[in-house]
DNA sequence: AAAAATACGTCAGCTATGTTGACTTATTTC
DNA sequence: GAAATAAGTCAACATAGCTGACGTATTTTT
């Protein structure tokens, strides 16, 4: 008869999650817009930057979108010299993806904005909060995907 | 010269936020799809349910979309009897929005799914974590909008 | 060496959800 | 009575997702 059982509604967190994510993703929009890009471009650029030399098919797995959806934005990013492609050394069918200098620089601007928002929030909270937050977000991911995400995030780039 | 300054990149949280939010919003998709609805319908239904008698213009403010975007999904929700409209008692220009019984029931199903995910995550974490998480999400919201969101969430419906 | 599988790209067309700007109707306020 | 407001609607458009089919280069399997 415990009220806080696993079904009890969490309207507060549901709504906070909605508003928080909206503002979090809203930060980069201004910069993206100036270049005629959208959030789809941001995601592609981000994950290529974080996984240099990633294969197209692995990027599709991460983003969980179709080849066509990716193709459209990837083409623009390559055409405008934010991303470059290199044939794989072992398997020349592959087009391994890398950010160009321009792409890397732009990517840094975008993650700086998002990191500032995160760091500002964390700085107003008790010590150790970032570990709690990280744990919460991790546990919100589908159980089957967690280890994959952990592997992905494990790559420290700073 | 502190490394953890307000600009230092938080790739881990940026990516966790992305994956967590995707899976969090993914839960209701199956049920929505069965009725031919999408996430836009979910958001409208949710905020009408949580704010019975809300005016159309206030709903627009919450969702930050245009009248046309809202109109499209709202019309479907009204046509299929998930939401009903009543002229305002004081100002008959208003069409105050309410969920029907059918709408309320469906809404409960959707938030149950999301609450389960949240409660499962929280249950695996130290005591007091939900307060930390709530605080974090709140602080991720644009400073200007926080009080408005706080007011909105303050309405306890359970 | 031929056949099958794989990695990637591309074509056509569709859907959902957002946008702008202009206009109408009913109602309330000045 | 005139102006402002709440809401609905029309046309047209953009972004970003989708499906299914097909082409090409390359690697793997038989």
Image (tube, coloured by chain):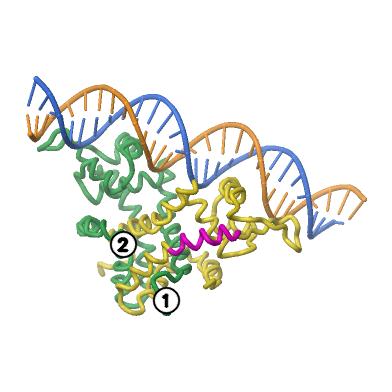
Chain colours: A yellow, B green, C orange, D blue
Q: Name the element at disc 2.
A: helix
Q: CA distance from mark 2 to mark 1?
A: 28 Å
Residue toward you, B111 or A70: A70
Q: Residue at x 54, y 54 (%)?
A: A64
The residue range painted magenta reads A100-112
Is the magenta region chiefly helix, strand or loop?
helix
Residue toward you, A62 or A47: A47
Residue A3 figure quarter:
bottom left
Dot 1: within a 10 Å radius of its alpha carbon, few (fewer than 14), some, or many (20 or more) residues? few
Q: Nearer the viewer, mark 2 or mark 1?
A: 1
Instruction: Tell me whether circle 2 and circle 1 mark residues in contact (CB < 8 Å).
Output: no
Residue B95 placed where, x, y %?
A: 20, 36
Indicate left or right for A40 with B104 as reference. Answer: right
Is residue A107 part of the magenta span, yes or no?
yes
- Rendered-image quadrant of the N terminus of chain B: bottom left
Count of labels shown?
Answer: 2
Residue A28 placed where, x, y %?
A: 43, 56
Q: Residue at x 30, y 65 (%)?
A: B139
Q: Residue at x 52, y 52 (%)?
A: A41
Is residue A42 part of the magenta span, yes or no?
no
What residue did someone put label 1 on?
B4
Residue A155 figure quarter:
bottom right
What residue did someone put label 2 on?
A13
Residue toward you, B19 or B42: B19
Q: Is residue B56 visible?
A: yes
Residue B35 figure quarter:
top left
Residue B84 placed where, x, y %?
A: 24, 38
């Amino acid at each position: 008869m415990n009220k806080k059982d696993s079904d009890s509604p969490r309207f507060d967190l549901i709504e906070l999650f909605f508003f928080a994510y909206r503002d979090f993703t809203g930060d980069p929009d201004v910069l993206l817009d100036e270049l005629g890009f959208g959030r789809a471009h941001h995601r592609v650029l981000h994950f290529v930057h974080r996984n240099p030399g990633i294969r197209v098919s692995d990027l599709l797995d991460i983003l969980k979108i179709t080849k066509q959806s990716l193709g459209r934005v990837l083409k623009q990013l390559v055409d405008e010299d934010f991303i470059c492609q290199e044939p794989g050394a072992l398997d020349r069918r592959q087009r391994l993806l890398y950010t160009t200098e321009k792409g890397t620089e732009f990517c840094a601007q975008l993650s700086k904005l998002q990191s500032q928002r995160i760091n500002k929030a964390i700085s107003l909270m008790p010590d150790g909060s970032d570990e709690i937050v990280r744990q919460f977000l991790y546990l919100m991911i589908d159980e089957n995907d967690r280890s994959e995400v952990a592997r992905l995030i494990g790559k420290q780039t700073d």
